[in-house]
Structure formats: C-alpha cells, structure tokens
Image (cartoon, rainbow, N blue to C red):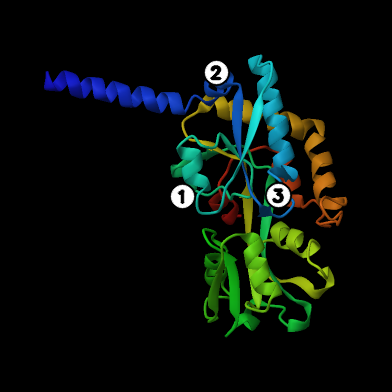
C-alpha cells in the first residue's frame, strides 16, 4: 500500500511538472500568455507607464506570440505583461507566472540549469558609464571610486574578473533596478555605472542632459542576450525559435532593431543611437542558443 501511494505521488508530481512545461497547451487552453517585461532595460524593454511596455524585445515577443496564436488556432490571445526584476525573473519563469521573459537576460551556463533560452536575439557588450566631466576613461581609474550596479546582475563580477580590474579596489553600490543604478550615477552617489552597453545608452538618452554622460573603458564582456522560457519544454522552444528564425531570415528583426535603437522612441522621442554590431549580425545569420561561456572561448 505504501509503495502504491509513493508511486501515485510520483506520477502526480510528474504530471504536474509536465503540465507546467507544456506552455503551448497552457496558452491554448487559457487563451492567454504572460510576458515578463522590464521597467528600465534600455531600448530592449521598458515601461511607458500605466501598465504599458515597449522596446525591441517586447515587440519581438509580441510577434512571436502572434505567430503562436496563429499556429495554435487561437481566436483571441490575451497577452498579460508581468514586470520582472533581475532578482525574480528566473523564479517567475520557473513557477509558471511568466511564460516568456522578454527583457535583457544573459544566456549563461548557470542559468541554463534552471531555465531555457531561445536563439540569441541581441549580443551585448558590458561597458562603463561615467559623467563626462569625471575624467574617468578606463578601469584603472575606478580605483577608490564608487561603482554602481543593479542587484541580481553579474556586471561588477565581470569588472573584478577583467585582467585590468583584478587589482583595482573600488566600492560597490547597488540600485534596485537599472533606472535606480543610473540615478546613483546621475546624483553623484556613484562615480560609474557598470552594465550592458545598450542599457547604459538607453538611460543616458533619457537623461535630462545626455551630453553630461559618456560610455568609456574596456569592453568587459560580450554576452548573448536571449528570450527566456521554461526548461524542458521542447515544443514551446521550437515554436519560439521558429518564429525568431523567420524574423531573422526575412530581415524583419533588423527593421525592428533600427526602429528601437536608431530612431526616436517614446516617451521622449530621443534616439539611443547604438548601431547594429557585427556580433549581433552574426547571431542572426547563424541562429544559436549558445551560452556566454561559448563566446568567451573565442
């Protein structure tokens, strides 16, 4: 009897797991999908206020979900936008609160143990933002300075691991999100902000006086940014990847990049002004879901 109960419990647990990882069925049965979005991840994903979100990754994911809606024969799909942070984005994908996370998440080997990633849609360079009048132009000049980063991100770890940053002593200060981290720099509570280049550029573009800031120093890391989904859901991953690959081959994703990074964007109609990198072009030409560790081997 005891063995039977254990067996039933095992089957039930497996069934529950299978249900949570059958995202296509979940979306079709409910007629809804939950999209994880960021409030201040540069032009990739940001808030317009009043529960509205915009950005390159947001629009890419909207098109992915529209393709899934069509393929699944769903008459009307209700897309629910769920704001996530660097700290909670992975748990919210794992527990089913978020079906598809469309922010600024780096695909790395550690995260791949807990979640899955679609093919890379953006390749990022981690850089340093400073005030133009600071005189700071390199990692070495951060000695004795306060360096801001966002809680739950890996940017300062990369700074410390960099060969030119290994012996540089600085104080780390944390922002709760990217906008808060930039505010630490803007207000003088930090001398530098270390983060993905497009997030830095996006926040600078939205600053009261963008010319007061500069992105400087050595490139700390080249990182594949990708849409995050639940692990062990091959059918959903294929649906997402197929949609993305179609956008890449048709040139649609390049048009979206131009729209969000090279043209004026809401709400202030300022340009981020970050031209498409060769690394991102290569990721689109040969779609893959390789983690950052594979990029570091190059």
Q: Which residue is mark 2?
A: 29
Q: Is residue 220 above or below residue 34?
A: below
Which is more toward the observer, 36 or 106? 36
The earlier-in-sequence mark between 3 and 1 is 3
- What residue is drawn where x is 66% and y is 61%? 179
Quarter of the picture containing the C terminus is bottom right
Q: Position of residue 140 (x, y in %)?
A: 63, 81
Q: Nearer the viewer, residue 44 or 233?
A: 44
CA separation in Å, label 3 and label 2 = 29 Å
Secondary element type, mark 1? loop
> Which badge, 3 or 2, comes first in the chain's sequence?
2
What residue sits 52% from the left and 80% below the top? 167
User: In the rendering, at what x and y percent does residue 12 appear?
Assistant: 31, 22
Q: Secondary structure at mark 2?
A: helix
**Circle number at residue 47:** 3
The local crowd at label 2, few if under 14, some if 14 to 19, many if 20 or more residues have their Cα within 10 Å, is: few
| Picture layout, residue 245 above or below residue 298 | above
User: Looking at the image, is mark 2 or mark 1 earlier in the sequence?
Assistant: 2
Relative to 133, is 102 on the left or the right?
Answer: left
Residue 115, image x, y percentages: 49, 40
User: Which residue lies at the image location 53% right of the left edge and 20% below the top edge?
Assistant: 25
Res 188 visible:
yes
Q: Which residue is mark 1?
A: 110
Under circle 3, the secondary element is: strand
Looking at the image, residue 112 sits to the left or right of residue 53; the answer is left
Residue 50 falls in image quadrant:
top right
Q: Considering depth in this image, is 103 or 176 the residue closer to the camera?
A: 176
Q: Are marks 3 and 2 in contact (CB under 8 Å)?
A: no
Q: Is 77 rendered above or below residue 188?
A: above
């Amino acid at each position: 009897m005891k063995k039977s109960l254990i067996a039933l419990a095992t089957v039930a647990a497996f069934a529950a797991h299978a249900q949570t990882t059958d995202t296509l069925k979940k979306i079709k049965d409910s007629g809804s999908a939950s999209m994880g979005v960021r409030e201040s991840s540069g032009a990739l994903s940001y808030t317009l206020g009043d529960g509205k979100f915009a950005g390159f990754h947001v629009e890419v994911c909207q098109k992915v979900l529209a393709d899934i809606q069509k393929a699944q024969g769903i008459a009307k799909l209700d897309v629910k936008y769920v704001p996530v942070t660097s700290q909670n984005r992975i748990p919210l994908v794992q527990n089913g609160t978020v079906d598809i996370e469309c922010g600024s998440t780096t695909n790395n080997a550690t995260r791949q143990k807990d979640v899955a990633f679609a093919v890379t849609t953006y390749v990022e360079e981690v850089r340093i933002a400073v005030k133009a009048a600071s005189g700071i132009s390199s990692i070495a000049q951060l000695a004795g300075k306060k360096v801001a980063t966002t809680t739950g991100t890996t940017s300062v770890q990369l700074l410390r691991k960099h060969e030119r940053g290994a012996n540089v002593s600085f104080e780390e200060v944390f922002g709760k999100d990217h906008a808060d981290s930039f505010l630490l720099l803007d207000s003088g509570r930090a001398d530098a902000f270390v983060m993905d280049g497009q997030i830095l550029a996006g926040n600078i573009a939205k600053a009261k006086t963008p010319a007061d800031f500069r992105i400087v120093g050595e490139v700390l890391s080249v990182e594949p940014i990708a849409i995050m989904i639940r692990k062990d859901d091959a059918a959903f991953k294929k649906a997402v990847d197929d949609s993305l690959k179609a956008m890449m081959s048709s040139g649609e994703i390049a048009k979206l990049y131009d729209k969000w990074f090279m043209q004026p964007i809401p709400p202030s109609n300022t340009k981020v002004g970050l031209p498409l990198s060769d690394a991102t072009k290569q990721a689109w030409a040969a779609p893959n879901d390789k983690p950052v560790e594979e990029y570091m081997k190059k």
